[in-house]
Image (cartoon, rainbow, N blue to C red):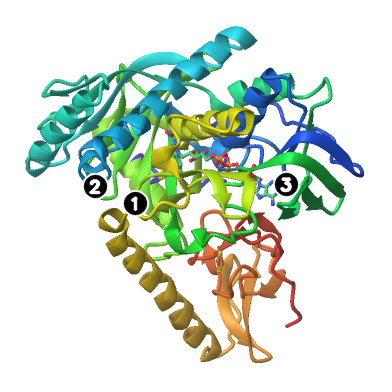
């Protein structure tokens, strides 16, 4: 640790947001008719919109807040088809054909981004370099060898190696060549500019409230209704969950730091087999070099250890392995993990032939979101995609998913019951300054935060999505729902869904 202890106490701030301009696209103002509505302005929605406008469609992107800020603005931004250890599992639990579709869709996503960058002429730090999963223990070497073999059989540029450029020894690694990294916001702000205009629109501060899958489809917002032939739901967690995604995905939070280090940065992107995994990659932004390093992934809403401690553990890992000079930025976000480890991409469900969804990227939605945007655009434009089968949102792979399905839903049920019992039997005490608690007020669970000035902020602790109780996130100062990942600021305003309504403020 440096003199004075760890340096991870400053306010969280994503490096991607801090080094790019804010956007200010106007909100929707009244009704509109376009070919396709895209709900959600992250990497998935903007990729779909880009592809559709390039094909001559008129598109309206509806973004609840600001584009490319949410999960996409808080990523590590590795652009790779290497998604931990996956391909040995995919070939054995799905089949070779669908494993190949997954591999090809994600490899193609890297090429898509590279060629879009060239066409747009945007300097977003895109760089080809190898990606590694390295063994945190010698016990993991056999599974790394099996992964390298399975991935190579699928045509991926994969090999097993005992040699890396890390400043410490590892027992072995799976190396994928010709992968990439980039500045996701610089890229996507340029993509959004090219979408906006000529009858297509990017609307910010325009939250979609409901999707009517009729003919034409209608997307309702408080600022007007947009009609269209097709709707792409790219809201991270799907808006209007009529296909039970809440029971098939669970949210996990992870933490990142951008640190300045003495000496050389590694020349590849790295991910470990440790649990939770460590992740890091080099990065140059505005001429300055950083190592982005983090991990510490956990189920959203798990507060032991507290989120602030997770940042300290990321910093401790960085300092143990690298000559860390200072911590420049720290940030965190969550992603959705599906029960069978493959995203849900395609037609949303029966009776909803013109509504498409892209979600559940399992922590790999840079390539996954681009692949999803491309596949959905192809489905909208041609009705078919030869890479769509593996991602079918309505698939059921009992062998791959049954155990995780039961385990995750049992956890949700346990949190639901446990948190309600704890809140309703609480003594009703108020927290100290800078702290928060869920307590009982007028017979109802209430989330109370007392800020550093002593002002009290009280909100209903009942998540409007499905009535779980929110928990306090001490590092981000947000109320997080442990069931399906909705997040709210300390005054109850929804930051991210599935909830679309705020936590009502309450009187104490
Ligand atoms: C810590 C961390 C590191 C990661 N690192 C990597 C990595 O290195 N490589 C990788 O491939 N993946 C990575 N991921 C995963 C990746 O960042 C995500 O999968 C991806 O950004 C998801 O993009 P998205 O477009 O689906 O969602 P988002 O970026 O969340 O976009 C969804 C958008 O929809 C908007 N929205 C929501 N509801 C509504 C509504 N009702 N109306 C209108 N708009 C709405 C939101 O405001 C948001 O802007 C990481 C994830 C985490 C948690
Ligand atoms: S996000 Fe589903 S209950 Fe809160």
Mark 1 or mark 2, earlier in chain: 2
Figure quadrant of the C terminus: bottom right
- Left/right of residue 502 with respect to residue 111 in the rendered view: right
The residue at the point 25 percent across, 34 percent down is: 96
The local secondary structure at tag 2 comes to: helix
Q: Which residue is mark 2?
A: 93
Q: Is residue 364 visible?
A: no
> x and y percent of residue 447 in the render?
62, 74
Most extreme residue toward the right is 30
Q: Which residue is mark 3?
A: 64
Task: Give ligand 1's quarter of the image.
Answer: top right
The residue at the point 30 percent across, 58 percent down is: 398
Tags 1 and 2 touching, CB below 8 Å = yes
Tags 3 and 1 touching, CB below 8 Å = no
Mark 3 or mark 1, earlier in chain: 3
Mark 3 or mark 2, earlier in chain: 3
The residue at the point 59 percent across, 21 percent down is: 187
- Label 3 CB-ligand 1 distance < 8 A: yes
Q: Which residue is mark 1?
A: 340
- Left/right of residue 66 with respect to residue 68 in the rendered view: right
């Amino acid at each position: 640790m440096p003199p004075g202890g760890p340096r991870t106490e400053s306010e969280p701030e994503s490096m991607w947001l801090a080094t790019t301009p804010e956007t200010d696209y106007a909100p929707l103002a009244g009704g509109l008719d376009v070919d396709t509505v895209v709900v959600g302005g992250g990497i998935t929605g903007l990729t779909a919109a880009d592809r559709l406008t390039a094909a001559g469609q008129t598109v309206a992107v509806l973004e609840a807040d600001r584009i490319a800020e949410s999960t996409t603005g808080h990523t590590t931004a590795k652009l790779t088809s290497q998604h931990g250890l996956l391909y040995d599992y995919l070939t054995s639990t799905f089949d070779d054909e669908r494993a190949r579709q997954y591999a090809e869709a994600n490899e193609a996503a890297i090429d898509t981004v590279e060629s879009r960058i060239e066409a747009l002429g945007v300097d977003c730090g895109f760089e080809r370099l190898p990606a590694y999963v390295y063994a945190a223990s010698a016990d993991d070497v056999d599974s790394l060898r099996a992964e390298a073999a399975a991935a190579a059989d699928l045509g991926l540029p994969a090999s097993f190696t005992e040699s890396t450029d890390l400043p410490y020894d590892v027992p072995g690694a799976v190396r994928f060549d010709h992968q990439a990294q980039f500045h996701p916001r610089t890229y996507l702000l340029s993509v959004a500019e090219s979408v906006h205009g000529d009858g297509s629109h990017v609307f910010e501060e325009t939250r979609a409230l409901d999707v009517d899958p009729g003919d034409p489809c209608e997307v309702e917002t408080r600022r007007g209704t947009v009609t269209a032939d097709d709707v792409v739901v790219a809201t991270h967690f799907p808006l209007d969950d009529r296909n039970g995604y809440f029971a098939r995905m669970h949210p996990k939070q992870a933490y990142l730091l951008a640190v300045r280090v003495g000496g050389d940065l590694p020349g590849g992107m790295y991910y470990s087999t440790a649990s939770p995994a460590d992740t890091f990659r080099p990065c140059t932004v505005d001429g300055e070099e950083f190592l982005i390093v983090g991990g510490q992934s956990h189920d959203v809403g798990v507060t032991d250890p507290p989120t602030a401690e997770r940042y300290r553990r990321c910093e401790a890992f960085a300092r143990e392995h690298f000559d860390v000079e200072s911590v420049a930025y720290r940030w965190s976000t969550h992603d959705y993990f599906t029960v069978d480890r493959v995203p849900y991409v395609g037609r949303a469900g029966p009776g909803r032939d013109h509504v498409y969804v892209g979600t559940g990227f399992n922590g790999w939605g840079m390539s996954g979101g681009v692949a999803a945007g491309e596949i959905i655009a192809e489905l909208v434009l041609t009705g078919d995609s030869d890479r769509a089968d593996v991602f079918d949102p309505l698939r059921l792979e009992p062998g791959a998913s049954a155990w995780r399905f039961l385990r995750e839903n049992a956890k949700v049920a346990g949190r639901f019951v446990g948190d309600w019992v704890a809140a309703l039997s609480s003594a009703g005490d108020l927290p100290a300054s800078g702290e928060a608690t869920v307590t009982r007020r007028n017979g109802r669970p209430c989330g109370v935060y007392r800020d550093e000035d002593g002002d009290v902020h009280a909100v209903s602790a009942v998540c409007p999505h499905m009535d779980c109780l929110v928990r306090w996130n001490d590092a981000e100062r947000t109320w997080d729902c442990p069931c399906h990942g909705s997040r709210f600021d300390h005054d109850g305003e929804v930051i991210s869904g599935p909830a679309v309504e705020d936590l009502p403020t309450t009187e104490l």
